[in-house]
Image (spheres, grey):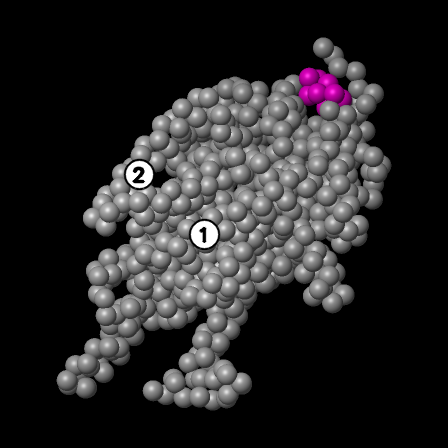
Amino acid sequence: MISNVTLVSLGKFDLKLHHLLIIGILSLSFSISFLVRSQSVDYGFELNEFDPFFNYRATQYVVDNGLNAYFEWHDDLSWYPEGRDVSKTSQVVLHTTAATTYWLFGGGMNLYDFTILFPVIFGSLSTIVIFALVRVIGGTTAGLFAALFFSVSLPIIIRGTIGWFKSEPLGLFFGILGVYFLLSGINSKNKKIAIAKLIVAGIAIPLSISAWGGSQFFIIPIGIFFLTLPFMRSDHKFIVWAIPLFTAIVFVVSMSFERLSSNFIFGLGGVSLLVPTIFLIVCILIQNKSTETKKTRNGLLFLASILISGTIILIVNADSEFLPLPSYRYLNAINPFLTTSIPLVDSVAEHASTTIQQSFLFHSILMIFAGLGIWLIIKNHKIQDSNFIKNDMILFSLIFGLIGIYVSSAFVRLEVFASLSLIILASIGLSMLVKNVLNNTESKKYKNLLVKSSFFAGIIILLVIPISFPEGGNWITASKTPPTILNGGSAYPVSTNDWLESMEWIKNNTPKDAVIASWWDYGYWISTLGERATIADNATLSTVVIQNLAKMLMSSPDHAWKMLMDMQADYVVVFVAGQRLGVDNEDQALYVLQGGGDESKKQWFIRIAEEPLPKFLESDGMSGNEHFWNETMLGKMFPFTPLAYVNFQTNQQSATYQPGFTPVYVKDIKYPSDSNGPLRLVHASPSFDIGKGQPMISVFIYQVNKDYVPTN
């Protein structure tokens, strides 16, 4: 065959045409992934979202002070006045990997710019790692399909775009790498190579979990897979030491990370790996002691006893908690039907449950090919002469696929695992389908050629649809959004310097020991860009502190001032997003709010403060009522007042709120710079003076008036 033609011989290695094809497709996958992830640079070359700013500051600390100082670092700018032990509460591997790669490959580049590119590079390198993993499972063709699918997968792309210096890109890279070396190791016929690969796998999995806690997902399919190995593999002498070696390395490496350590080993994550490993050893011993006819039966009886005992332990542990339980978000991933009454958890957008519409947007054609893959795998697994995919790899792909889809139903952030699962199954299904079509030896060659041509044309059309349609919401364009620092996370796809300018103002115009109060969303921006201490940030280390901030915002101005004094706050930051209307009223600028700033989050502030919503909101659950605007600190800090209510569909106006009507606001600064009240407005960002018809993304900084005397 042409693909087997040798092009160049390098010692014992012959470079053949199909090797060039593999290199070409992998290069294409890397390039596509890099370009798609980099689209947001059109808005500005900045870090994206909130956590990346702390991760950048932590990486800068490593670069400037070294690893030893990093592990001793107590951050005084976080969670004032207690501070934060960084190595105990952070993604250590993310910071140390970024610093190490910067030392090696930075080449004089600014560290901030390097961290902006970091997720794009590792996210794109993951296309090669997923190729290696799926190649071990289902062959080279399946691996190449997986690389291409991974390069355009929307759930994976949106959590790894340029500037997304967060946990997922590196966590997925190490997680996929660990699974690859595990499967490759247990399939290796050379024991020395197998040992090396299993050790690398045992190192990569803890690195993945330390980089991103969500990578504990990989433990679940691995653990279930271990339960099946005594029944699927006949080489018991090999797996009886290979699997314990992997598990032991995972535990040893985990002990080197403060955040994992015993919390992981003795928690549900460690137990989910340790119990299947012990089961595998004991089950093999039982099978070795059993007669040939009773091996499988005795093993299955032991497995049933383990599953029943495990279920009882989990039920008992739900009350007694003798096993350390993970946080709610991890429990929710295990049990998507779990609900919480904690408003702070519910308020996080990425904790929202995935809707059917989102699932179809995220996966669309992959669902079809994954279903086809499952059907073909089950249909063909008994064909002995095909040697296409081994039984244990069949089982792993099905376990990984089904667990990934199940876990992702908990909330949107975990859709990356559904995407990984569907990529694996779809790639295997499509490769099997291609193999069957190419092996079709129809006697009438012209008819065979027509069928094959039609088949490949149909496949190409199906694959092109989700990356091309609809025009503004396909897999490619949907991942192009402004960096959050440039639009404040508002609903407006614009790029402004309001937040950057405000953080620069704080840095240059406030005392270095100043303490800033704000909603916890903005804490990392203030400590990193403003270089000032914050009371709460995105680490959410203390729900009590965050709740106190919510109570302060929803309290009367006098009571809120007392709370700010107790917090030792010097300044308060509030963020308002909206749009100036295209018309004014008697030289008064008119605005509509509810654009994604604090004005859109107030219902969560109310719930977190444990106050009733009707006390502050109109019947629509969004518009502030008279009590909100006149008697709360947050209402007073918003430099706007409702002028009238308008039904924009009918152009009706009302002086009071009516269902279906939208509040229209005018500027009204309640605490000006010369105010004798509890606060003084000392800075308003540029878009507060935006022109007609333009979005307003305004940051307001108030100084706490330490000389204020409350009236009650």
Q: Quadrant of the C terminus?
A: top right
Coordinates of residue 291 in the picture (x, y in percent)? 24, 47
Residue 88 lies in the magenta-colored region: no
Looking at the image, which residue is at 20% across and 48% down?
A: 293
Judging by the rendered image, the residue that carries numbered circle 2 is 302
The quarter holding residue 148 reads bottom left
Query: What secondary structure is marked by label 2?
Result: helix
Looking at the image, which is closer to me, 695 or 503? Answer: 503
Horizontal placement of 21 versus 608: left or right?
Answer: left
Magenta part, dominant SS: helix
Looking at the image, which is closer to me, 3 or 496? Answer: 3
Coordinates of residue 654 in the picture (x, y in percent)? 48, 29
Looking at the image, which residue is at 24% across and 57% down?
A: 378
Q: Which mark is residue 224?
A: none
Residue type indicated by callout 1:
Trp
Horizontal placement of 158 versus 303: left or right?
Answer: right
538 over 49 or under it: above or below: above
First along the sequence among labels 2 and 1? 1
Visible residue check, residue 295? yes
Q: CA distance from mark 2 to mark 1?
A: 20 Å
Visible residue check, residue 46? no
Looking at the image, which residue is at 45% across and 76% down?
A: 22
The quarter holding residue 637 reads top right
Residue type indicated by callout 2:
Phe
Q: Residue furthest left?
A: 443
Mark 2, other Cα within 10 Å: few <14 / some 14–19 / many ≥20:
some
The quarter holding residue 571 reads top right
Q: Which mark is residue 241?
A: 1
Looking at the image, which is closer to me, 166 or 509? Answer: 166
The span picked out in magenta is 558-566
Looking at the image, which residue is at 83% across and 20% down?
A: 707
The number of discs equals: 2
